[in-house]
Amino acid sequence: GIQVEQSPPDLILQEGANSTLRCNFSDSVNNLQWFHQNPWGQLINLFYIPSGTKQNGRLSATTVATERYSLLYISSSQTTDSGVYFCAVLPNYGGSQGNLIFGKGTKLSVKP
Amino acid sequence: SAVISQKPSRDICQRGTSLTIQCQVDSQVTMMFWYRQQPGQSLTLIATANQGSEATYESGFVIDKFPISRPNLTFSTLTVSNMSPEDSSIYLCSVRQLLTGELFFGEGSRLTVL
């Protein structure tokens, strides 16, 4: 099956710094999503981005489907950005009824 | 996006008991799923909850351990049966938007088994 690899696994930032999180996937996908899991365990949708670039405030994401990777950019990080960031993909071979496959996540800690 | 409510949000359970988690969606959805997240791990799909028929389980998950009901298009339950400490996890209900395939999650139910 498809492999989803996220890097780095852990990241510590000083408040105000910028960062880039990466998601590589081993096969073509119909769908790619980025999630933020806050310290209370809630999963928050950040981006639905099977291709192209999107921006939402301090966050932006780019997916290059032909090269099988996606990037999540966090600018001017804040302590509330702390948590785990997950990339999840829907493989092409599953069609619309397939299941999202999650990466192992990047754990981000933003220090004041 | 749909609003997904789960309860309980957390519970502490004794070994050998069973607990049922409820998931309520504020609109009719076709596809509902249950995921498990063990401590420090990523999310793993348990099963697809099918309306009016038996759930479709992923490899490693069986109906006797994780019975699922879905009586209508807005409600589902997951039961964790005969619990052991290894079942301590966050259990999450999710729904998929039909047109785009985007997945949304409930708040999760954090279970601790003693």
Image (cartoon, coloured by chain):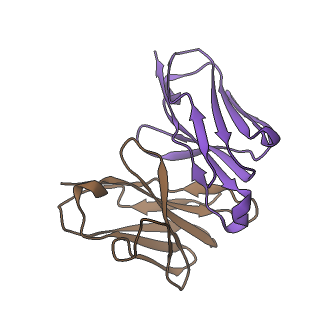
Write down the colour of chain B: brown
Query: Could you say where residue B21 lies in the image, as x and y percent from the top left?
Result: 37, 66
- Quadrant of the image containing the N terminus of chain B: bottom right
Q: Quadrant of residue A6?
A: top right
| Residue at figure coordinates x 61%, y 44% from the top left | A4
Q: Is residue B22 left or right of B50 when viewed as pictured?
A: left
Quadrant location of the C terminus of chain B? bottom left
| Residue found at x 54% / y 85% | B52
Colour of chain A, in one word, is purple
Q: Which of the pair A71/A112 is nearer the observer?
A: A71
Residue at point 58%, 77% (across, down): B73
Residue A8, above or below B25: above
Residues B59 and B33: in front is: B59
Vertical side of A83 occupied by B10: above or below: below
Is residue B113 rendered to the left or right of residue B54? left
Quadrant of the rendered image containing residue B19: bottom left
Find residue A33 and report its horizontal and vertical position in percent.
66, 46
Q: Position of residue A22 (x, y in %)?
A: 64, 32
